[in-house]
Image: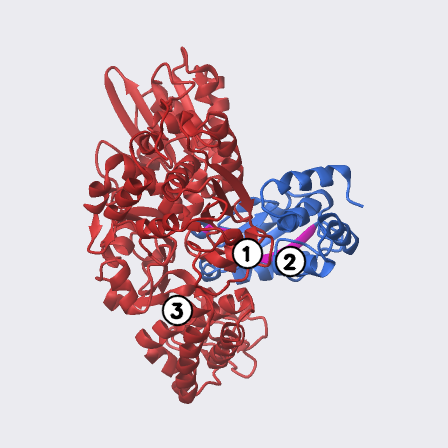
Amino acid sequence: MLTDAERLRIEETFALYESRSASAVDGLLIIQQSRGWVSDEALADLAQFLAVSTHSLESLASFYSMIFRHPVGRHVIMVCESVCCWIAGSAELTAYLNDRLSVGLGETTADGRFTLLPVVCLGACDRAPAMMVDGRLHGPVVAADIDSILSQYP
Amino acid sequence: MAATRTLVRPAPQNPRLTVPEVDIRICLGTGGVAAGSREVLKAFEEELARQDVLAVIRPREDKCEGRTVSVTGTGCQGLCAMDPLVEIHLRRNGKSSKVTYGLVTPAMVPEIIEKHILGGEVIKKWLVLTDEGPTEYNPFYDAQEKLTLRHVGIIDPEDIDDYLEAGGYQALYKVLSEMTPAEVIDEIKRSGLRGRGGAGFPTGQKWEFAAGYQSPDGVKYFICNGDEGDPGAFMDCSALEGEPHAVFEGMAIGAYAIGASVGYMYVRAEYPLALRRIKIGLEVAEERGLLGDNIMGSDFSFHIKLKEGAGAFVCGEETALMQSIEGDRGMPRLRPPFPAESGLWRRPTNINNVETLAVVPWIITNGAAAFAARGYENSKGTKVFALAGKVNRTGLAEVPMGMTLREVIFGIGGGVKKGKKFKAVQMGGPSGGCLPESLLDLPVDYETINKTGAIVGSGGMIVIDEDNCIVDTARYFLSFTQSESCGKCPPCRIGTKRMLDLLTKICEGKGTLADLDFLEKMAEQVKIGSLCALGGTAPNPVFTALKYFRDEFEEHVVDKRCRAGICTALVTYSIDPEACTGCRACVRVCPTEAITGERKEAHVIDNELCIKCGACYEKCRFDAVRRS
């Protein structure tokens, strides 16, 4: 079931568009903001609320990389894989994070603390290699700094 | 359409009553914040209080009255390589001075307050810029001319009064009070402004098309494309974070010109700071009657709605972006019909990028001729370039178009990092191409760069040095476009994958000369056959790499050699017995025990055991480990 608060926020987005179905992506993001991710059940509830099919919502959720269809950790780390970061050594950064957190890209640590994701570009090419944790940008990041950065996110 | 009522000229509600004696401006752009500028701002706040200096951190809150020091957080100040940047204006005894310090940390703040602010003494060791004489950073600033980013890094982007005080919304007032839509379009046409998002299409002409189509129910849309996903370019992020009202003003002027009543601002989710400042800005602009119904008391109404992206590179393509606003998968659709005729919800729609819109108010205020007086042949005005990669002074530089690549990269950017040799500059991100040293004296204008096979694109310049392998870089770009392809059309979906496979094969040392020809042929097919610009331009990095660096490709397939030492399958390590001192440093660092040798005797690498990790190469202090 969608909560009243979620329903209210989704209804507010109706005014933005010509059709109710256009609120689909916003709806998914709103659910994700309150629950951390979008479960099958939540997706079905949203589909019913917007009077669209579940598979059309599923196709949106799978298209947009910022919509999570699996539970994520308390903190989401996005490592920029774009060209400037790649030139500056983002592969080493990812390798270090893989090793340090024992997770691959797209995975969540066993203790549920971190989810590690790749991102196309954070627009921080001047601070390459860059990564973003919960919307906060870090860069340039060298492997030696990572432990102290991670410690800021308990 | 022209105004029939008396309009209200926009003015700050809360003007500065006194000019502060000390005016401190701290860069709070994304880059500055990541470098720790919020902590620096906090340190100023605390230290000024501790030293009993009367200061006001957010100048507006108590109007500066009786206060002598003002501290303002601004947008990006440009020289990102030296972030956090702190600019200090002193006005004392009838004299004024302006000094910028770089790489400022909270620990430096007490000294800056004591020596500079209280004592009036410039601290040379931290100096980036002063009006008293040139520094090593002057070349970065001197060649620049800021039209688009005119207030970015100067004003507080979260305070509309700062923008109004700097002349903000006066261009919109001028348009609404004394110009017809046709006159606005004519002005933009005469300025020669071309779309800064990549394609370089003349903006005035685009507006004219959109103005020419009638909507059955009178609804037209005006969209700002803030889905800057082009890797290597970050000027739109900086413009939105540093001066969002300039973009709103540009949108409103354009909307008036084409007759649109609703606008969308599509901004990527990866820019949380920009999104926050846009939300703040839109709300206050509506409150003040600068956007919304009957703007400034005129008959013109224009509402801007913010649409946050959800993570898809392809949404930067205009038709994909419109699909995304409509709540669909952001997949490009065939053109024609063009958006001007049938765009968002099949209404006439105009789309411009952030940088284009940010400069529109300047053109209206200063006139088309002033803009057209700058620039080069058919590329008028100034353009913001983003310097990134292996360049010394990374950052944003706004210069008149037509400046040479060399002037931008070596003059403004200060050349290649660590004294390495320049290899190429990638222009236009994954849709562009890499240009060699021999082309650096070309002027940066749309036509000249297009002829080389690269594009000006959104203005990213990524510098690549001798340590980068051109084949591997081309492979990287294909892996990028391949994973960002939306999958709608086969030439892009399958073609980029096959090109990537071939490039990987070459990097692994399994390529042949015939593969190079096949690669070129396939690139041609992908270019011709793809539905949108993402696929159509995806082969560009390969075309230019093959055109200007074919010898490096041939080395990979014929000699099985990678001169940059990047393609591990093609690299072998050996130890020069003459240079080796037998210090055993490499022996200790080798993870596979492939290096043997006694102390003080030349060591040897066993290539059977070597995994080519390069650890010995990095470790050796005598340059005895050779990579070939």
Residue B554: image location, x then y, percent: 37, 83
Mark 3, mark 2: which one is toward the viewer?
2
Instruction: Tell me where the magenta segment starts and ends, as one range.
Output: A114-124
Residue bearing mark 2: A60
Give, as a three-letter code, the residue at label 1: Gln
Q: Which chain is red?
A: B
Specify whether disc 1 shares its chain with disc 2.
no
The answer to whether residue A20 is seen in the rendering is yes
Give, as a three-letter code, the residue at label 3: Asp
Corner quadrant of residue B589: bottom right
Residue A60: image location, x then y, percent: 64, 58
Asked if residue B476 lies in the magenta stretch, the reply is no
Mark 1, mark 2: which one is toward the viewer?
1
Residue B506: image location, x then y, percent: 46, 81
Which of the labelled discs sits on residue B623, or is there none?
3
Q: Residue at x 34, y 17 (%)?
A: B19
Residue bearing mark 1: B323
Q: Which chain is blue?
A: A
Looking at the image, which is closer to me, B476 or A149? B476
Residue B57 placement, left or right of B269: left
Q: State which chain disc 1 sits on.
A: B
Residue B377 placement, left or right of B121: left
- Crowding at dot 3, Cα within 10 Å, few <14 / some 14-19 / many 20+, comes out as few
